[in-house]
Amino acid sequence: MVEQNPKVAPEVIWRQLDENAVVVSPKVGKVRVFNGSGTLIWQMLAQNEPLAAICERLVQTYDVTPEQAEADLQRFVADLTQRGLLVW
């Protein structure tokens, strides 16, 4: 797992509604709604949790191997970074 950790981009607005995180990027006018695992990851990123801790939580919460959790987390973070929702 990479030592450096992403942060929620400062201009991004988000709220949790029921079990989902709703994320708004004012720069591009897009709204994203995350499912349960995406919401868990987003909340932990918003709290500046390290990626290693997020990966551990995914393994504990969902029935996945550490390798699968890390691969899925890396894809999710890369996608959010590309969309401008996370900064490094």
Image: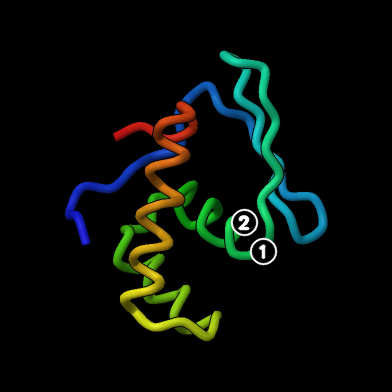
| 57 vs 14: above or below | below
Quick check: marks 1 and 2 in contact, CB under 8 Å?
yes
Q: Is residue 65 above or below residue 43?
A: below
Q: Residue at x 44, y 80 (%)?
A: 59
On screen, residue 21 above or below 65: above
Tag 1: amino acid: Gly
State the quadrant of the N terminus. bottom left
Find disc 2 in the rendering and name its residue: 39
Where is residue 15? Give x, y as percent: 71, 42
Q: 45 left or right of 87?
A: right
Mark number, residue 62 = none
Quarter of the image with the C terminus is top left
In the rendered structure, the answer to whether residue 31 lies left or right of residue 88 reads right
**In the image, what residue occupies the spot 55% across and 80% down?**
62
Which residue ends up furthest to the right in the rendered image? Answer: 18
Mark 1: which secondary structure? Answer: helix
Circle 1 is placed at which residue position?
36
Q: Nearer the viewer, residue 62 or 3?
A: 62
Residue at the outermost left position: 3
Q: Residue at x 45, y 41 (%)?
A: 79
